[in-house]
Image (spheres, coloured by chain):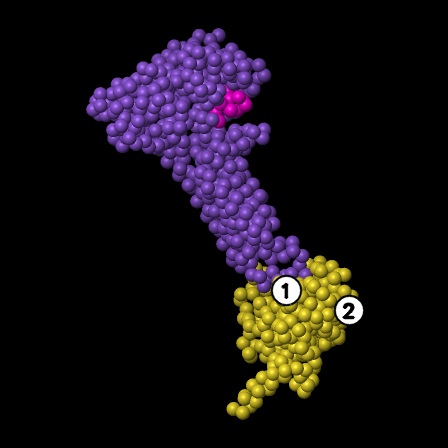
Amino acid sequence: MTELLRGIPPLLAAHLELALVALILGAAISLPVAILVSRRPHLAEIAIAATSIVQTVPGLALLALMVPILSSIGAPPFGFWPALVALALYALLPILRNTVTGLRGVDAAAVEAATGMGMSPWQVMRLVQLPLAAPVIAAGVRTAAVWTVGAATLATPVGQACLGNYIFTGLQTRNFAMLLAGVMASAALALTLDAILAAFEAALASRHRGRAWIPVAALVVFVAVVVGVLPRAITAGDPIAVQASAAPVERDAVTHVRIGAKTFTEQYVLAELIRARLAASGITAELAQSLGSNVIFDALVRGNVDVYVDYTGTLWTNVMHRATNPPRWQVLAEIEGWLAHEHGVRSLGSLGFENTYAIAVRRQAAEQYGLSSLADLAHASQHMSLGADYEFLGRAEWAAVQRVYGVQFARSTTFDPALLYDAASRGEVDAISAFSSDGRIAANDLVVLADPRGALPPYDATILLGARVANDARVVCALAPLHVSVELMRQANAMVDRDKVSASDAAAWLLARIDAPRCP
Amino acid sequence: MIELEGVSKRYGGVYAVKNVSISIAKGQFVAVLGESGSGKTTLVKMINRLVEPDAGVVRIAGKDVRDEDVVALRRRIGYVIQHMGLLPHLTVMENVATVPRLLGWTEAAIRARVAELLALVGLANFGDRFPDQLSGGQRQRVGVARALAAKPEILILDEPLGALDPVTRLDLQRELKRIHKELGLTSVMVTHDMVEAFTLADRIAVMYRGELRQLASPHDLIATPSDDYVAKLVGLALQQAEVMRAL
């Protein structure tokens, strides 16, 4: 539990920093725009409509969209920048709308009197309109602050550390204490900012505007404590962290690496496994967890991440954009060559297990319809319902299963992967799109249907090394002989998912059951 | 001092002001009288260029106002409007100090001027109050003080007393007259209240549908109305007075 709480301050600091910079950037754009368009109703309508459209894009999608957009203009598409741009876009609407509304709501007599007294248009804006609209503008900033803090939790999948790390990891590993800690910290942050900005707004609306400095000072102190003091106070008592951050970076031998992990349990466990193996060779490592599937490969190519585990099927279709379905050995070989040639990325070969898409059914349904392979589904599927993760129904694998086996479910529903297995075991659906190494297959007593005609492509797990570490003897020696059977992987995953064991403990358990490398 | 020569203003093809010429001598108090929509406000706004005429010329002290910087021009002309337009986020003192501050006066000069003006309008102890802590009449006094802050020679009043109760109104009319004389101002006041025009003005300009129907002293207006409309207007006022007297 203390371990859990000690992880919060650095994430809280990163979260606040991100949200605040995004808020300031959003205000820096929307305030001048609002002032410029406030006198031209048509332009104001257009500006508000444009920012409203941004608002209708779901937060997760907006953040994910920033990755290809920033990438295409040559900006860093990973981590802080895409998160910042997306959140700043989010902050535009409330500030823009409130500023335009506030400026329009200013008493026309005050403006006319000021003009008649001999104020230039800019003086009227600065001395009359802006001060009178200030409380309304402050309310817009306040709304934007709460939105930004909330949406910042979605920055995790694009590789930016924030409280979303706890939320995503907690959700994926069913660690509800972790999930709750992340949610509560983010809510507390939003409420605190809201309270401070509410006081600021009230001060501006009152006769004692001079007192507005009090909430401003409170904000500065709050930010200083959260960003500057808290994380340091925590790491001060943590010799490992100090050592890690003070580790000297040598030009030749790699002494420190960044390990990436996607957003599911197996990835967390394997990342910890890699960390443990590297530590045994005297290499320190840090984890960049819960990266989006589309982001993590980019991160590897750009050197933001040095090592992570990917799956051949994903690389084959999503990264290399191949549509064919050749045999397993050929896929592996082609991928290795392509990665090395195109990106200087090294694939260490199959980890020894596959994590492929599979159709899993409830035991009761399997018995009722006599199901053991996908071929048996041809008739039975008309009476059954399918639950799938967000992407499965749109993927080539699903089309192949339908085509090859003539499968036609009566009904199909989309679930979050975190809920999918429970939905099957509780009978809400009869079959689900599952991952073959997922611990929850056994935990939820599901039956994986065989694929005798090879409709589903191979998804061999493979360790990828970025260019910086690809030829480092110690790194390669520590990781190359790693071999994990699908049974062991499934059990380790189940330990996390079902038994609430931490990912690092599951990795330690796994490490004790696989051969240790003999490195010089 | 102020000359309007053949000025016109159209809004969407309709004349708000049509070919009006008025000449106002230094120290005069002129009332522009008319019903709503008669163009009287549009006319006076041409003096401080809040409205630019489509045709005609406005001159102040012989100089075409268009040749002058509009901001500098407005700072030389005191301007009071019906809804006074006091800035609600500023104190009475800060409101009155607005134009001197824009003109870059020293703090000491501003302070002295504000004290002088608040005394002039009878609000010596109200400097630290905010507009919403004042009565309607007090606010209008602040509006007048503010208009006079930078020692203008010309004062434009656009229905300054329209929203006040009759007693306060009478008080303020007297004070305006006093201040006008004391400071040697040239004043132009828009009003739709005939009695007000008759009480305050040296000359009255009667506007009707954008046209100037008559420009004359109160006495001449009663004695020799130029047309039926002016005659009717004057007749109405006299009738009302008679009704009151007969009671």
Q: Which chain is purple?
A: A
Image vertical order of residue B219 relative to residue A452, above or below: below
Point 28% across, 22% down: residue: A378
Image vertical order of residue A282 relative to residue B174, above or below: above
Point 42% across, 14% down: residue: A326
The quarter of the picture where the N terminus of chain B appears is bottom right
Q: Are discs 2 and 1 less than 8 Å apart at CB?
A: no
Of A63 and A269, nearer the camera is A63
User: Mark 2 or mark 1: which comes first in sequence?
Assistant: 1
Where does the image place residue A16, in percent across and percent down from the top left? Answer: 49, 38
Q: Is residue B235 visible?
A: yes
Where does the image place residue A32, in percent across and percent down from the top left? Answer: 60, 47
Residue at the extreme right of the image, as rendered: B62
Image vertical order of residue A383 relative to residue A283, above or below: below
Point 61% across, 68% down: residue: B81
Of A397 and B140, nearer the camera is A397
Q: Which chain is yellow?
A: B
Q: Look at label 1 and name its amino acid.
A: Gly
Image vertical order of residue A288 relative to residue B174, above or below: above
Tell me the residue that label 1 is attached to. B13
Total residue callouts = 2
Where does the image place residue A257, in percent across and percent down from the top left? Answer: 50, 20
How many neighbours does mark 1 have within 10 angstroms: few (below 14), some (14-19), or many (20 or more)?
few
Residue at the extreme bottom of the image, as rendered: B246
The residue tagged with tag 2: helix, strand or loop? loop
Tell me the residue that label 2 is attached to. B61
| CA separation in Å, label 2 and label 1 | 32 Å
Q: What span is in magenta? A: A295-308
Point 70% across, 63% down: residue: B54
Reply yes or no: does residue A301 show up in magenta. yes
Residue A479 image label: none
